[in-house]
Amino acid sequence: MKIMHYSQVSPRQFDAEAVKGVTGRVVIGKADGAQHFCMRIFELSENGYSPKHSHEWEHEILIHSGKGEVWQDGKWVSVSPGYTVFIPPDEEHQIRNTGHEKLVFACVIPSGVPEL
């Protein structure tokens, strides 16, 4: 069993043209012996965004804090704490921070795909 605060996991920073102000952490993954799923915690700084992309696997998201938007079917949908997002395989998606504080969310993906 593993019990710890997500901030204790070493962060990985993402900042480029396609992605801005994103910090990602693998909080439960292969290294922990997780055989079926990987949980990541992402923080998007003010005006930060993930890349617009799609992939072959689904993932599930829980918005923990902050305000943001998720790209779905060609439009932006507002999200805030408590919102859940299911992204099916091959669906284009992107998340952006629209607030003044960090947008923090948990993201679960299946094992066997890149963890970060």
Image (cartoon, rainbow, N blue to C red):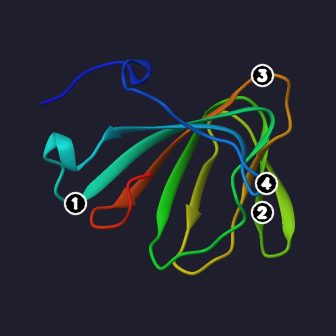
Mark closer to the chain start, 1 or 3: 1
Horizontal and vertical percent position of residue 71: 77, 63
Dot 1 or dot 2: first in sequence order is 1
Hey, which quadrant is residue 111 in on the image? bottom left
- Label 3 and label 4: CA atoms lie apart by 21 Å
Please name the amino acid that badge 2 sits on.
Answer: Trp
What residue is drawn where x is 38% and y is 61%?
114
Q: Which residue is mark 2?
A: 71
**Which badge, 4 or 1, is on the more N-terminal residue?**
4
Disc 4 to disc 1, how far (Cα)?
32 Å
Residue in the picture at 61% in, 74% down: 54
Mark 3 or 4: in front is 4
Q: In this rendering, would 81 be left or right of 114?
A: right
Which residue type carries mark 4? Glu
Of the residues under marks 3 and 4, which one precedes in the sequence? 4
Q: Which residue is mark 4?
A: 17
Q: Which residue is mark 3?
A: 101
User: Residue 36: which disc?
Assistant: 1
> What secondary structure is marked by label 2?
strand
Do the numbered discs 1 and 2 sit on residues whose CB atoms are within 8 Å? no
